[in-house]
Amino acid sequence: MSKVEVFRALHRHRAPGDPLVLPGPWDAASARVFAEAGFPALATPSAGVAASLGYEDGHTPADEMFAAVARIVRAVDVPVSADVEGGYGLAPKELVERLLETGAVGCNLEDSEGGVLKDPRAHADWLAEVRSAAADRLFVNARVDTFARGVADPGQAVERAALYVAAGADCVYPIGAPPEVLPLLRAGIQGPINVGAPVGEGPSPAELGARGATRITFGPGLQRRATRALREIAEGLRP
């Protein structure tokens, strides 16, 4: 199987309590650490990569983000999905071509811009164009930003997710969804659901899986925890 086929297969037939756990590397060295630890695939976090390149989240130039993803992909043998935020204003065909050039097998695509939710139907149409350009060469994870933008009603997340799945998204990611609403989302959403988990606190990946998560990612949490650890080491080096 190709790497994208392997990645797609990892999302299928997940038992409750056994979600796919995807650590988020921010550079080649961290990617090797996660791959050597035995994780079958990885998913880059845009905020973590941005921090590693010296940018604030959401301000990484597209060329630098794609170059960083390519370095991560080259460093490991496992499939890598890339968080490319809102697509950097690229037309769907160019976005797909740039992603495939990096060697990534999938992507995260957000449905808000500048802190404002996009029109869900217009965004679904755009996702359909991405899917058409990618065919089966990319696994598309459509982020649903309602909870992150202060919309607490799970119904709105379910409605957006349905549009995105119909447009060809392979997975949806209701970022910021409280753990207690996951059973409602699971009941209303077809296909895999990505859930973000904090590092070292809150429900475990297994508990989130039991509530309905198909896969678990950590956003920039791992990069930030590594930075805190490095800061502690640096403090210990001072005379």
Image (spheres, rainbow, N blue to C red):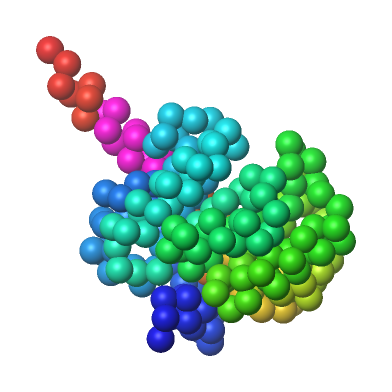
Q: Give the x, y percent position of residue 59.
A: 58, 33
Q: Quadrant of the C terminus?
A: top left
Horizontal relation, residue 127 to residue 18: left or right: right
Residue at 53 percent of width and 87 percent of height: 13
Residue at 32 percent of width and 59 percent of height: 74
Q: Give the x, y percent position of residue 164.
A: 76, 68
Q: Quadrant of the N terminus?
A: bottom left
Horizontal relation, residue 1 to residue 137: left or right: left
Tell me if I can see residue 195 in this picture.
no
In the picture as drawn, the residue positioned furthest to the left comes out as: 239
- Residue 227 magenta-drawn? yes
Magenta stretch, main secondary structure class: helix
In this rendering, is residue 82 above or below 183?
A: above
Tell me if I can see residue 33 in this picture.
yes
In this rendering, is residue 134 above or below 117?
A: below
- Residue 162 magenta-drawn? no
In this rendering, is residue 214 above or below 50?
A: below
Q: Give the x, y percent position of residue 4.
A: 47, 76
Start-end of magenta stretch: 221-232
Residue at 33 percent of width and 40 percent of height: 226
Figure disc tally: 0
In the picture as drawn, the residue positioned furthest to the top comes out as: 239
Q: Give the x, y percent position of residue 48.
A: 45, 42
Q: Nearer the viewer, residue 4 or 233?
A: 4
Residue at 37 percent of width and 59 percent of height: 73
Q: Nearer the viewer, residue 106 or 195?
A: 106
Q: Nearer the viewer, residue 159 or 111?
A: 111
